[in-house]
Amino acid sequence: RITRRQFSLLSKRRACAQEILKTERTYVDGLQILLDVFLDPLKAAQSLPEEYKSIIPQVQVIVGYNSLLLNQLEERMKRFHVGTCIGDAFLRMTDFLKGYTSYCNNYTKFVSLLEAMKD
């Protein structure tokens, strides 16, 4: 039997985990749109300047890893209980997170290119 305080803490913990899940789902969806709506058509039309072509495989890798993380979070939330942990799913991805460096370094330049191409 759990106390009111324990129930309150568990409820807050579950709400935080649900917010993390929701945020990750939105992030993966946004990256997938970036690939499907912008990058893949630009690549197919060969309209992407050479210096930006390296971003496509970077985004594909990021989508892949974040989709795996999303699946792990979804599975854990289906069976969420007092002992459910989600932090270890992030810890397993620490080596992958180093791959964000190149993506982040080129992000502003790439967004500027997309904006210019939109006009």
Image (cartoon, helix red, strand yellow):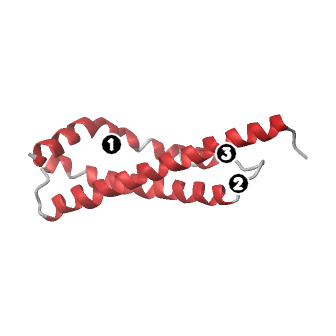
Asked if the residue at tag 3 contacts the one at tag 2, i.e. Cβ–Cβ closer than 8 Å, the answer is: yes
| Circle 1 Cα neighbour tier, 10 Å, few/some/many (<14 / 14–19 / ≥20) | some
Label 1 residue SS:
helix
Whether residue 97 is situated above or below residue 76 in the rendered picture: above
| Circle 2 Cα neighbour tier, 10 Å, few/some/many (<14 / 14–19 / ≥20) | some
Asked if the residue at tag 1 contacts the one at tag 2, i.e. Cβ–Cβ closer than 8 Å, the answer is: no
- Which three-letter amino acid code belongs to the residue tagged 3? Arg
Left or right of 32 on screen, residue 90: right
Residue at (48, 46) in percent of width and height: 23
Q: Which residue has dot 3 on it?
A: 14
Q: Earlier in the sequence, mark 2 or mark 3?
A: 3
Q: Which residue has dot 1 on it?
A: 103
Give percent across and percent down for residue 97. Answer: 47, 43
For the residue pair 107 and 13, the one nearer the viewer reads as 13
Give percent across and percent down for residue 29. Answer: 39, 55
Spatial distance from mark 3 to mark 1, Cα to Cα? 32 Å
Label 2 residue SS:
loop
Residue at (35, 57) in percent of width and height: 32
Q: Quadrant of residue 44?
A: bottom left
Spatial distance from mark 2 to mark 3, Cα to Cα? 8 Å
- Which three-letter amino acid code belongs to the residue tagged 1? Tyr
Give percent across and percent down for residue 112. Answer: 17, 38
Does the image show residue 87? no
Residue farthest along the bottom direction in this orientation: 44
Spatial distance from mark 2 to mark 1, Cα to Cα? 33 Å
- Which three-letter amino acid code belongs to the residue tagged 2? Phe
Q: Which residue has dot 2 on it?
A: 80
